């Protein structure tokens, strides 16, 4: 049972402490510090995720703000992790720690591509945002009570472009037939679809977020008791960090549009890790959300704001009919409501996207930094031998 | 031309009911109960246009039959435009006058809209329908007249819309007209949007072609007149490309003919003026991104590679990717990005780089990602120079690129570049220092046969020589990125660059290592030859490269040469001193008489020893021809005179014939010939040639 395995590891940890102290004085200035340090890391991670879980009420989870908070937590954990690695670098040269840390760095490099793909996704959201702004300005009734044909057509066109942009790539060709763009010349249709689909800069055509996630989580297993013992518990820290990395990248892929999204990564974190319970709970919530939303069609991201855009714009699209552009009072009231919703989302994104983008970049740099620093100090140690 | 044929047709058809329409529009609006009638009105107007548009058979008939009814030609889009232009200021004035009367009752501000306004809209709509059906054989934007006709019409509609929408009385009374105008405006804008995209995509004469400044202007002026200017421009460009060395050549990107840029700018202007600026910008952004990416692929063979892919790539593959990356980055900095900025500024004046940023920013980040990814790959010595290439590219080409971005983005980009450069720099230093460790840890136990140049020496020196071609960069890299690296070790001596001291250190390590290796030879002369071979190789390499020579300095070279002379002396003494001993006089004479048995013994020993030396030392290797001949000359210089003298003095005591033949095995000339066979590295006679060839 994992439970006993862990406590076994723990008790051994204390047993081995003095031995370790004897073996390598410089690495352990105080005999207790390492255990305390690693414990506090576990606690820190757990606290962060308990907090995240608590703030993940139905309408909060997967919001731009919530994911931003998740990234903040990740950055904190990564920073702590970096310090721990630095403090115990001499350990990293020894078996099995050398293998474990290398394994972590390999996984973390894969996360960098996810970060870049997410940044592209953010750019894509910005594009949608502009289309929404077009819709909003077209349907602006502040001056004119009744919407005219021109306004309706204009809004409709932007809404259709938006809908195509938000479709999963594979599906956009199917929807081609359903497009009802008023004055577009037929010969352009195919071209147009390819045209409005924004390019991804950072990854090649064949890149797949789903595969990348699988790469990060591939064969991730709780460390063996012998490894925990041999590393004075450091193996648990690395395992925890890897799990968090996997989870955070998974959430990003779940929320933000990117190439070949896929969430079917096997997750299992044993409950005896304090952080595992909130993480698994979040995982379940997100999976549920995904089942709910991706059921009908593979969507472009579970981000709450995207969902709102999708919903409001679809409803708006249904409300305004390009063949009959006179709206009943009831209808125009509803149009106003949807418009208000879209305006609110746009406003939220205007404030939220830039800092979010920056956080994703921070995650990128932090991962690189941790890796470089650790490898440097390892290299130095190796050379001194 | 067709336009003129068709317009009267439309006029004729709609003439009857138009007047009534406008009038009824006004009246019905007064009733303030508009829904039904508005719709009817609108449908009616639209219906007219639609019929025209959707019934090509009808149109054809019209074309034939309308030819003669020329008098009606008066009411065309052009003539109505003039009327509209005169009317708009009136409307504008009305708007101004009633600006503050928003609370007033509708009737007070009633303003009559003349019927030709509706007529104008109908004619314009008809024109759009023609374009939409793809009927005109010529492309409108290639005909300056068509361009201005269409764009001015769009402009009028937009102005009309602005005025109507801002005038309360019009909003109250002419809603159906406003809707009609708005609908036509939307249709025109959608048309322009599509056209903008098509022009953007298809009018590039040739992406980034080399043309001279001269041909540029020449082409622009001629192309204006030509229907198929694209083709013309392409062939012109190709002609230009055949002309070699045309003075100051300039690469043209994005390569739109001047008139096309003008059309694009006008469309952008009109769309913006009509409130459709966002649509236009979106089309532009997506279009330019696609084109830029395509260009990079075509011109630079640039393909996006993810960080993970870089990690997985074999070095062979990555080694090919890096020059492509370098070229792409340089070209972007000097050509493609400036071209994008210029184009955005020309089509959207006053945009101040924001479109340019969206087009290129993601790409800039992608570039840096690649640089970071390479720095993150497993370190190995062969990667140093390619990493320095990337470093240099960032150092040299980024400043120009950075300048293109607006202030607020520059900071972020600069950070990214700084971080990528640090990463590359640190990696370069590590790799360079890894050389140190690989020398330290090279402890091969088998001595190189024949005392030849050790592979480690060869490798190290070639590596150093190559790195000195990057000397300035390496010095900069050591200076900027090695603070962390050295802090725990001895401080760098002042006056010496970190790179130079690293180089010195490597040389010392190499020396030390060679010293150890020389002890693996049991034969002292052979270990001397080994040291001479390696020492000579090192000195030659250093003298052969100005950069490394500069770093190591003359003093170092002199000291090195004198060390070599010592080895030479040692070798001479160890090998030939012993042989010379046999040629001494002592012990051969006794009371003035020759002691023949001793003499015979001497000759025998000399011959045997010389044979032995010859046998072993012909297998030794001295690849450096100069060193080889120096050695032979110095040996000959010592041996031949001594041998001659010995022969002259004692040869006579042996009986001629059998005895002489038995003991005097070699004439001095023979000895000389045999000395010339030394250091050939012979294991068999056939290997002579191969040994010589390797230098």
Image: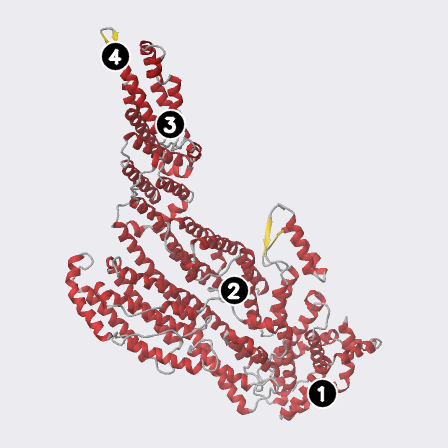
> In terms of depth relative to the viewer, which is nearer, B133 or B171?
B133
Residues at circles 4 and 1 in contact by the CB criterion of under 8 Å: no
Q: Locate residue A194: give its quadrant.
A: bottom right
Residues at circles 1 and 2 in contact by the CB criterion of under 8 Å: no
User: Residue under circle 2?
Assistant: B359
How busy is the neighbourhood of tag 3: few (under 14 within 10 Å), some, or many (20 plus)? many
Asked if residue A366 is positioned above or below residue B679 in the image, the reply reads below
Secondary structure at badge 2 equals helix
Q: Position of residue B405 (x, y in %)?
A: 48, 60
Point out the frontmost of discs 4 and 1: 4
Asked if residue B535 is positioned above or below residue A286 in the image, the reply reads above
Earlier-in-chain disc, 1 versus 3: 1
Point out the frontmost of discs 2 and 4: 4
> In terms of depth relative to the viewer, which is nearer, A318 or A202?
A202
Q: Chain of mark 2?
A: B
> In terms of depth relative to the viewer, which is nearer, B548 or A348?
B548
Q: CA distance from mark 3 to mark 2?
A: 71 Å
Q: Chain of mark 1?
A: B
How busy is the neighbourhood of tag 2: few (under 14 within 10 Å), some, or many (20 plus)? many
User: Residue under circle 3?
Assistant: B678
User: Residue under circle 1?
Assistant: B21
Q: Position of residue B206 (x, y in %)?
A: 62, 58
4 and 1 marks on the same chain: yes
Q: Position of residue A133 (x, y in %)?
A: 51, 76
Question: Of all residues shown, which one is farthest toward the right?
Answer: B68
Residue drawn at (23%, 69%) of the image? A40
Disc number placed over residue B588 in the picture, else none: 4
Q: Chain of mark 4?
A: B
């Amino acid at each position: 049972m994992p439970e006993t395995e862990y406590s076994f590891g723990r008790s051994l940890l204390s047993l081995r402490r003095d031995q370790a102290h004897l073996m390598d004085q410089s690495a352990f200035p105080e005999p207790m510090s390492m255990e305390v340090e690693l414990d506090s890391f576990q606690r820190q991670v757990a606290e962060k995720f308990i907090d995240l879980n608590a703030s993940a009420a139905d309408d909060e989870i997967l919001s731009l703000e919530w994911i931003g908070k998740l990234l903040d937590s990740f950055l904190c954990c990564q920073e702590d992790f970096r310090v721990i690695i630095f403090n115990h670098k001499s350990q990293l040269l020894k078996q099995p720690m050398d293998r474990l840390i290398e394994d972590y760095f390999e996984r973390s490099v894969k996360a960098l591509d996810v970060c870049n793909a997410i940044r592209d996704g953010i750019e894509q959201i910005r594009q949608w945002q502009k289309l929404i702004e077009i819709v909003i300005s077209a349907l602006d009734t502040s001056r004119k009570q009744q919407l005219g044909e021109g306004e309706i057509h204009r809004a409709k066109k932007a809404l259709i472009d938006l809908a195509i942009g938000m479709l999963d790539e594979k599906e956009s060709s199917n929807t081609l037939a359903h497009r009802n763009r008023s004055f577009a010349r037929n010969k352009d249709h195919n071209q147009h679809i390819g045209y409005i689909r924004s390019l991804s800069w950072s990854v090649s055509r064949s890149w797949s977020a789903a595969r990348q996630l699988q790469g990060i989580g591939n064969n991730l297993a709780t460390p063996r008791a012998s490894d925990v013992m041999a590393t004075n518990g450091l193996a648990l820290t690395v395992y925890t960090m890897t799990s968090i990395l996997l989870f955070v990248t998974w959430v990003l892929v779940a929320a933000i549009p990117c190439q070949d999204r896929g969430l079917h990564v096997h997750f299992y974190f044993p409950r005896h890790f304090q952080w595992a319970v909130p993480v698994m709970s979040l995982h379940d919530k997100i999976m549920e959300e995904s089942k709910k939303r991706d059921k009908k069609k593979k969507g472009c991201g579970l981000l709450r704001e995207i969902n709102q855009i999708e919903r409001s714009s679809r409803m708006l699209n249904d409300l305004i009919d390009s063949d009959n552009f006179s709206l009943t009072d009831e209808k125009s009231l509803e149009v106003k409501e949807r418009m208000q919703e879209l305006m609110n989302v746009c406003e939220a994104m205007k404030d939220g996207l830039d800092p979010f983008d920056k956080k994703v970049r921070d995650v990128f740099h932090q991962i690189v930094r941790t890796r470089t620093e650790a490898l440097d100090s390892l290299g130095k140690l190796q050379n001194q031998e | 031309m067709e336009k003129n044929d068709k317009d009267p047709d439309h006029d004729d058809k709609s003439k009857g009911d138009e007047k009534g329409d406008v009038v009824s529009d006004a009246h019905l609006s007064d009733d303030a109960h508009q829904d039904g009638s508005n719709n009817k009105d609108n449908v009616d107007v639209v219906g007219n246009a639609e019929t025209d548009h959707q019934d090509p058979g009808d149109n054809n008939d019209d074309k034939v039959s309308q030819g003669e009814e020329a008098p009606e030609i008066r009411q065309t889009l052009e003539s109505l435009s003039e009327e509209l232009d005169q009317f708009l200021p009136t409307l504008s004035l009305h708007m101004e006058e009633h600006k503050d009367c928003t609370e007033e009752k509708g009737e007070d501000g009633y303003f009559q809209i003349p019927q030709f306004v509706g007529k104008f809209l109908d004619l314009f709509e008809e024109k759009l329908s023609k374009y939409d059906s793809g009927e005109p054989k010529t492309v409108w934007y290639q005909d300056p007249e068509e361009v201005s006709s269409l764009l001015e019409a769009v402009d009028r509609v937009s102005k009309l819309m602005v005025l109507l929408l801002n005038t309360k009385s019009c909003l109250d009374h002419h809603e159906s007209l406003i809707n009609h105008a708005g609908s036509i405006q939307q249709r025109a804008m959608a048309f322009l949007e599509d056209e903008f995209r098509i022009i953007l995509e298809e009018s590039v004469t040739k992406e980034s072609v080399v043309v001279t400044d001269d041909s540029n202007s020449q082409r622009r002026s001629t192309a204006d007149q030509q229907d198929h200017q694209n083709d013309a421009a392409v062939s012109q460009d190709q002609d230009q490309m055949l002309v070699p060395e045309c003075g100051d050549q300039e690469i043209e990107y994005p390569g739109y003919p001047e008139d096309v840029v003008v059309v694009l700018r006008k469309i952008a202007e009109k769309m913006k003026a009509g409130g459709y600026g966002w649509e236009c910008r979106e089309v532009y952004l997506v279009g330019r991104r696609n084109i830029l990416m395509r260009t990079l692929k075509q011109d630079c063979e640039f393909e996006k590679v993810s960080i993970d892919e870089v990690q997985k790539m074999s070095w062979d593959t990555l080694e090919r990717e890096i020059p492509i990356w370098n070229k792409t980055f340089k070209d972007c900095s000097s050509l493609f990005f400036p071209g994008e900025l210029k184009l955005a500024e020309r089509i959207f004046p006053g945009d101040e780089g924001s479109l340019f940023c969206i087009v290129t920013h993601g790409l800039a980040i992608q570039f840096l990602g690649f640089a970071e990814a390479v720095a993150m790959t497993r370190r190995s010595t062969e990667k140093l120079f390619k990493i320095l290439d990337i470093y240099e590219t960032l150092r040299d080409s980024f400043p120009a690129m950075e300048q293109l971005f607006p202030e607020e983005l520059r900071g972020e980009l600069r950070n990214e570049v700084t971080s990528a450069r640090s990463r590359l720099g640190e990696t370069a230093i590590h790799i360079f220092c890894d050389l140190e460790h690989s020398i330290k840890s090279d402890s091969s136990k088998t001595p190189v046969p024949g005392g030849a140049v050790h592979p480690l020496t060869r490798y190290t020196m070639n590596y150093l020589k190559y790195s000195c071609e990057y000397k300035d960069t390496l010095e900069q890299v050591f200076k900027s990125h090695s603070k962390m690296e050295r802090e725990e070790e001895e401080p760098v001596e002042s006056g010496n660059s970190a790179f130079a001291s690293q180089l010195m250190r490597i040389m010392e390590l190499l020396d030390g290592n060679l010293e150890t290796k020389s002890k693996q030879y049991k034969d002292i002369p052979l270990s001397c030859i080994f040291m001479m071979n390696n020492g000579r190789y090192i000195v030659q390499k250093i003298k052969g490269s100005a950069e490394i020579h500069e770093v190591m300095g003359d003093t170092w070279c002199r000291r090195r040469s004198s060390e070599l002379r010592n080895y030479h002396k040692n070798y001479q003494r160890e090998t030939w001193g012993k042989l010379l001993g046999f040629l001494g006089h002592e012990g051969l004479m006794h009371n003035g008489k020759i002691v023949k048995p001793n003499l015979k013994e001497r000759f025998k020993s000399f011959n045997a020893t010389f044979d032995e030396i010859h046998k072993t030392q012909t297998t030794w290797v001295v690849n450096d021809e100069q060193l080889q001949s120096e050695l032979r000359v110095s040996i000959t210089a010592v041996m031949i005179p001594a041998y001659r003298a010995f022969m002259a003095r004692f040869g006579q005591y042996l009986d001629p014939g059998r005895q002489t033949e038995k003991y005097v095995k070699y004439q001095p000339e023979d000895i000389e010939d045999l000395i010339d066979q030394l250091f050939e590295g012979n294991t068999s006679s056939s290997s002579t040639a191969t040994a010589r060839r390797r230098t």
